[in-house]
Amino acid sequence: MNAATTLLFVFWCVLLLGMEGTMAKSPDDYRAKLQQVNLSDGASKEEAIVIAQNYLLRNAYKDGYKISRPRVNDSTIVKDCWAVVFPTTWSVKLGQGLKWLEVDVDKTTGEIKSVGWGPS
């Protein structure tokens, strides 16, 4: 192996190993993560992601959205909520013009407060 091939191999190994702990592999893995959510102290960012991912699975949105790659911010739409934003797949972007789906999760209760789609 030359240096470039070795470097590429190491890069892919690090990338795949780094993703191992953060990505669920199947709907059952996402459901199992939901069972570990403890809302007694409110919903953390990580718990909000798990709640939103399970919402997408229950409502058949998983195929058009990158369920394992959300970003989380404070919601600008709903007070005291996390905005969990899932990017769309290329087929949804091209076919429907939508670029993201936002699931607003209450920071105290973990309840889904709103869901919306966006063009940009």
Image (cartoon, rainbow, N blue to C red):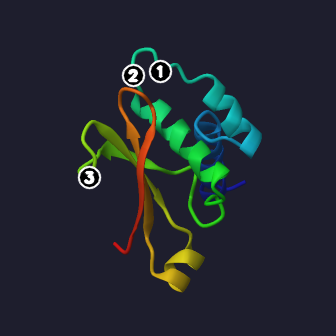
Mark yes or no: residue 26 visible: no
55 relative to 76 in the view: left or right: right
Q: Which residue is mark 1?
A: 39
The amino acid type found where label 1 is placed reads Leu
What residue is pinned by disc 2? 42
Q: Quadrant of residue 59?
A: bottom right
In this view, 28 is above or below 96: above
Judged left or right of residue 67, residue 58 is right
Q: Give yes or no for contact between labels 2 and 3 (Cβ–Cβ under 8 Å).
A: no
Task: Identify the residue position indicated by label 3 in the image.
Answer: 77
| Circle 2 residues within 10 Å: few <14, some 14–19, many ≥20 | some
Q: Residues within 10 Å of mark 1 (few under 14, many from 20)?
A: some
Task: Specify the label residue 6 is tagged with.
Answer: none
Any part of residue 15 in sight:
yes
Residue contact between numbered discs 1 and 2, judged by CB atoms under 8 Å: yes
- Figure quadrant of the N terminus: bottom right
Element type where label 1 sits in the image: loop
